[in-house]
Amino acid sequence: DTPLADVSHARVTEVSSGLCRVATGDTTLLCSLKGTLKAAETGYSNVVAVGDHVVVTETGNGDGLVEEILPRRNVLARPDPAAPHLQQILAANLDQLLIVGAWRNPHSWFELVDRCLSTAERHGITPLLCVNKVDLAEPDDDIDAVLAPYTDLGYRVVQTSAEQGIGITPLRLHLHSQVTVVAGLSGVGKSSLLSAVQPGFNLKTGETNADREQGRHTTTQALMLPFADGYVVDTPGIKEFGLAGLDASELIAYYPDLLGAAMHCKFADCTHTHEPDCAVREQVFAGELSATRYKSYQAIRVSLGG
Ligand code: GDP
Ligand code: ZN
């Protein structure tokens, strides 16, 4: 067995039960996991995740063995559908979370955007907010004003139209040589945007690579695809990811804009949903805080059971 010299470039790009695909400098290996690698007592249900840096040994015929998983810089995780007391890592070692919403069709994206922002903050992953389909804005729509709560907080925001080629260059600059997870409801234009950034790229055809054609299937949980000198990670389970294990009372901490007011509520344990003398609600009603941000706070709070 020959250990690969450059383990810094051995990166897991696809995972299924017991098998994973590892991209090294110039090749891809289909790897099994060394028997001593166990998920037990890590709090996670999976041993290896997309994005992991690993030490691999080549075993021939394009196969390999994962010997070691190197420490992770960060992870995106969600409750494991099969074992709710454990978390399932969706992806690891990420540079940024690209959160895509559509200005219209579908328009109801604020809650998901805010959920993803909280997730990014919580996991130490830099968010990048993209509002697509700006070509569908009505003359009276003030996109800048709607996005002000986000830009005021210092978030990077790009306005795009995949259809009309608006904002594609700034988006490309943000994605260049980064490992980016793409989040967003189905239909907001994620695939269209990525193929606008990199013509020919198709988010949904990770399945048609040569290995698959040769019948070496791995059942994909998340997929990491080479993109713009970096990678994009396409992962299911976006809705619930990241907020697992978050106590409803902690949610406000991920709303830096609401947090200032929350210090002035009458009750120390104010939930900012119904209490009298709630400074958050007062400032929202007075128009001093964003009503859409507050609405998403309420909705997420309910979903967290409080
Ligand atoms: P995904 O599910 O997020 O990957 O979304 P798709 O990229 O498949 O796009 C969903 C639909 O929205 C398709 O019919 C696209 O043609 C359309 N679409 C994508 N981007 C834009 C845009 O910027 N403007 C408009 N008007 N339609 C778009
Ligand atoms: Zn309050």
Image (tube, grey):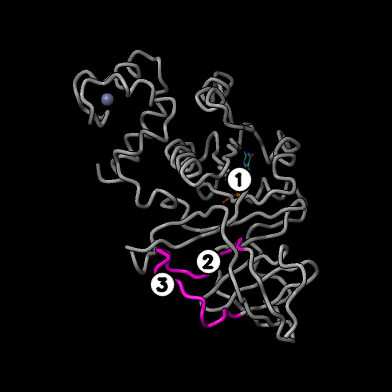
Q: Is residue 51 magenta?
A: yes
Quadrant containing the N terminus is bottom right
Does residue 61 appear to the left or right of 291 in the view shown?
right
Position of residue 10 relative to residue 153, above or below, is: below
The numbered disc on residue 86 is: none
The numbered disc on residue 221 is: 2
Instruction: Look at discs 2 and 1 and give the one toward the viewer.
Output: 1
C-alpha gap between disc 3 and disc 2: 20 Å
Seen at 65% across and 57% down, the residue is: 203
Question: Of 7 and 170, which appears nearest the observer?
Answer: 7
Query: Badge 1: few (under 14), some or many (20 or more) residues near its Cα, within 10 Å?
Result: many
* Image position, residue 184 (x, y; %): 53, 46
Q: Is residue 68 magenta?
A: no
Amino acid type of disc 1?
A: Gln
Does residue 240 appear to the left or right of 15 in the view shown?
left
C-alpha gap between disc 3 and disc 1: 28 Å
Amino acid type of disc 2?
A: Gln
The numbered disc on residue 96 is: 1
Instruction: Look at discs 3 and 2 and give the one toward the viewer.
Output: 3
Seen at 59% across and 44% down, the residue is: 98
Q: Secondary structure at mark 1?
A: strand
Query: Pointers 2 and 1 in contact (CB under 8 A)?
Result: no
